[in-house]
Image (cartoon, rainbow, N blue to C red):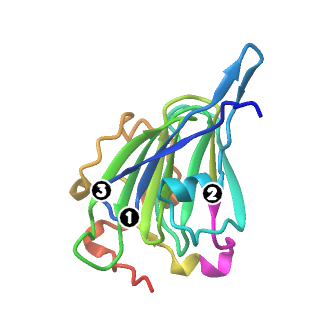
């Protein structure tokens, strides 16, 4: 039996409990490359929770460099990968407890992915045009659940996020600009 090269996932822990960053290789030749974007058995072996079951994949296409979205904390777990492009991503722990307000930043590329548990607010800023941001979740999106989300303002100085592209030069929608400051956010109770 031949041994063939395959995608491997290597996890790194972060300062936010449960937030994991994975290095993901790909197998290439003169035709291009192949990569498993999500492979449950390999991810679980690398440290992702075994009970994370994907029920929905969503794709965010970002046409321009500097598109900035977030901070949003939804009532589900999320696995994030980049198909093409590169993003600067920031995460804020909005769960009740001693880590409330703790922030982690990372650059995500097609060879780096992120798993975040519910209650962690995520945001990203595209560093290249035509960036495809793919995320898999373990609960279906619905407008009825929107009131269960938690939000934080991208510009809150308490978070100490240094955006690569200044927010006054970034492409940000009005709704994201109006999110509350951390001091006004009620911590999420996660069961």
**Distance in Å between CA atoms under marks 2 and 1:** 34 Å
The crowding category of the residue bearing disc 3, from other C-alpha atoms within 10 Å (few below 14, some 14 to 19, many at least 20), is many
Q: What SS does tag 1 mark?
A: loop
| Residue farthest along the top direction in this orientation | 30
Q: Which residue is mark 3?
A: 103
Which image quadrant is residue 19 in?
bottom left
Question: In which image quadrant can residue 133 be found?
Answer: top right
Q: Regarding mark 2 in the picture, which secondary structure is present there?
A: helix
Q: Which mark is residue 97?
A: none
Q: How far from the left and from the top, in percent, is residue 143?
A: 67, 75
The disc, 2 or 3, on the residue closer to the chain's N-terminal end is 2
Report the front residue among 79 and 64. Answer: 79
Q: Work out whether residue 71 or residue 43 is closer to the camera in this orientation and state it.
A: 43
Which residue lies at the image location 70% right of the left edge and 31% below the top edge? 4
Q: Residue at x 35, y 75 (%)?
A: 95
Stretch of the chain drawn in magenta: 136-145
Across and down, in percent, residue 188 comes to: 39, 80
Measured Cα–Cα span from mark 2 to mark 3: 29 Å
Please name the residue that numbered disc 2 is placed on.
41
Mark 1 Cα-neighbour bin, 10 Å: few <14, some 14–19, many ≥20: many
Q: Is residue 9 above or below residue 157?
A: above
The image quadrant of residue 7 is: top right
Instruction: Say which quadrant the C terminus sits in.
Output: bottom left
Question: What residue appears at the point 65 percent right and 44 percent down from the top-left corner?
Answer: 37
- Could you tell me residue 11's position as x and y percent? 44, 48
Residue that carries the numbered disc 1 in the rendered image:
152
Name the front one of labels 3 and 1: 3
How many numbered marks appear? 3
């Amino acid at each position: 039996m031949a041994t063939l090269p395959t995608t491997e996932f290597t996890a790194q822990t972060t300062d936010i409990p449960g937030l994991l960053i994975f290095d993901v290789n790909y197998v290439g030749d003169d035709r291009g490359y192949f990569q498993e974007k999500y492979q449950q058995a390999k991810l679980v072996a690398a440290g992702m929770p075994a009970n994370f079951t994907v029920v929905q994949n969503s794709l965010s296409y970002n046409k321009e460099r500097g598109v900035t979205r977030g901070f949003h904390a939804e009532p589900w777990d999320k696995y994030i990968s980049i198909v093409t492009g590169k993003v600067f991503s920031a995460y804020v722990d909005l769960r009740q407890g001693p880590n409330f307000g703790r922030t982690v930043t990372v650059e995500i590329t097609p060879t780096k992915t992120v798993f975040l548990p519910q209650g962690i607010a995520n945001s990203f800023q595209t560093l290249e045009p035509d960036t495809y941001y793919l995320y898999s979740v373990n609960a279906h999106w619905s407008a009825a659940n929107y009131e269960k989300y938690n939000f934080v303002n991208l510009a809150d100085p308490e978070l100490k996020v240094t955006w690569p592209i200044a927010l006054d030069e970034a492409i940000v929608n009005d709704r994201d600009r109006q999110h509350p400051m951390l001091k006004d956010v009620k911590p999420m109770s996660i069961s």
